[in-house]
Amino acid sequence: MIVAGDSAGGNLAAVCALRARDRGGPELALQVLVYPATSGDLTTPSCARYGSGRDTFMTLDEMEWFWAHYVGDAFPPACCATHRRASQESSSGAGKGCSGARR
């Protein structure tokens, strides 16, 4: 099986790969991530610098809208919604929820 995705799909592919690893399958032959959105943290310096302006492709408001529709009203989400959080939980053995920051 191969998992692949770009942007939000890249995040979904990464989370699926981690879950497959942690749950013992299915075995993946390949993972392809193209500019994956791997964090819901909209408070980073990069978001502050590039989140608005005339040449901005996607604004912070739009990103917040997309993340809210992905994880719902509950934040932090009750599941591993991002690759970064899922990876942290896998290494810590927590696996019961995620944490994150919204602006």
Image: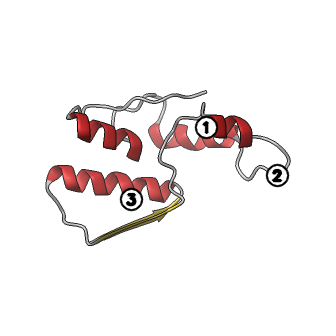
Say whether residue 22 is left or right of residue 10.
left
Residue sitting nearer the eye, 79 or 91: 91
Residue 69 x %, y %: 52, 41
- Write down the quadrant of residue 98 in the picture: top left
State the SS at label 2: loop
Q: Which residue is mark 2?
A: 55
- Give the alpha-carbon distance from disc 2 to disc 1, as whole Å: 18 Å
Question: Where 87 sits versus 97, above or below?
Answer: below
Residue 29 x %, y %: 26, 72
- Tell me which numbered mark, 1 or 3, is placed earlier along the sequence: 3
User: Within 10 angstroms of label 3, few (less than 14), some, or many (20 or more) residues?
Assistant: many
* Residue for point 28% across, 52% down: 18
Quadrant containing the C terminus is: top right
Residue extending farthest left: 24
Mark 1: which amino acid? Answer: Glu
- Give the alpha-carbon distance from disc 1 to disc 3, as whole Å: 20 Å
Callouts 2 and 3 close, C-beta under 8 Å: no
Q: Which residue is mark 3?
A: 13
- Tell me which numbered mark, 2 or 3, is placed earlier along the sequence: 3
- Tell me which numbered mark, 2 or 1, is placed earlier along the sequence: 2
Residue sitting nearer the eye, 91 or 98: 91
* Residue for point 62% across, 42% down: 63
Q: Which residue is mark 1?
A: 64
Question: Where 6 sits versus 68, above or below?
Answer: below
Q: Mark 1 vs mark 3: give the one in front.
A: 3
State the SS at label 1: helix
Mark 2: which amino acid? Answer: Asp
User: Within 10 angstroms of label 2, few (less than 14), some, or many (20 or more) residues?
Assistant: few
Mark 3: which amino acid? Answer: Ala
* Residue for point 73% across, 38% down: 49
